[in-house]
Amino acid sequence: VNCGRLLADENDPELAKIVRTVPVGKRRFEAVHAYCTKISICKPDEPNENGEDAPPSQPGHGGCGRLQPAIRREALKLFSVNKQQKHDEEDDTKAQQDKRQLSAAEVYTLFKKITDSDITLMGLSAEFARPDWMIITVLPVPPPPVRPSIAVDGGA
């Protein structure tokens, strides 16, 4: 939940098969989501073995290299759950969960980082259906003269 890149690499044959066979829309979004839930680390670009000045043989994924948390929903709140390794004297490794609430602003900035090519791979339209547009940032409120009046019965 850092760089906004799709966890699957564009050069991955399984993702290429999904893009070829599943039509654009809800079904492709579900297929890409099901595939990406299996991936837990955002792949960084691998260093070039031919030298720094030589062009890479394949374009890199461009990820951040971080372990991605699981996103859980409880009622209307979203939580980011990270599994961290904790070393104790008694146990060699003991998994500890770090759970924190995601604010709407954090989700909005993450959605803003998603590239147009990743949006197209997910089956959405970069022109008509960007994910960051699905979060309300400005709430229009009509002025008082336009609002309907409320009849109040006599009170004393």
Image (tube, rainbow, N blue to C red):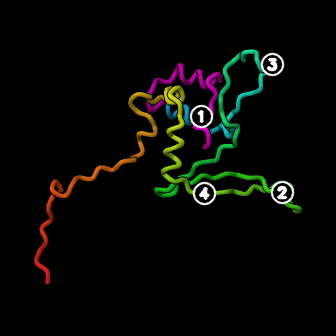
In primary-sequence order, the first of circles 3 and 4 is 3
In primary-sequence order, the first of circles 3 and 1 is 1
Name the spot of residue 84 as percent of width and height, x first.
Answer: 73, 52
| Secondary element at tag 3 | loop
Q: Residues within 10 Å of mark 1 (few under 14, many from 20)?
A: many
Q: Distance between the residues labelled 1 and 4?
A: 21 Å
Q: How far apart are marks 2 and 4 (CA)?
A: 22 Å
Q: Is residue 41 depicted above or below 124 in this figure?
A: below
- The residue under label 3 is 51
Three-letter code, disc 4: Arg
- The residue under label 2 is 87
Q: Residues within 10 Å of mark 4 (few under 14, many from 20)?
A: few
Question: Which mark is in front, 3 or 4?
Answer: 3
Q: How crowded is mark 3: few (under 14 residues within 10 Å), some or many (20 or more)?
A: few
Name the spot of residue 147 as percent of width and height, x first.
Answer: 18, 56
Q: What span is in magenta?
A: 1-28
Cβ–Cβ under 8 Å for marks 1 and 2: no
Answer left or right for 151 relative to 12. Answer: left
| Secondary element at tag 2 | loop
- The residue under label 4 is 100
Answer left or right for 11 relative to 87. Answer: left
Q: Distance between the residues labelled 1 and 2?
A: 31 Å
Q: Is residue 10 magenta?
A: yes
- How many numbered tags mark residues here? 4
Most foreground residue, 135 or 10: 135
Residue 156: quadrant of the picture: bottom left
Image quarter (top left, top right, bottom left or bottom right) of the N terminus: top right
Residue occupying image coordinates x 69% and y 41%? 66
- The residue under label 1 is 5
Residue occupying image coordinates x 52% and y 20%? 21
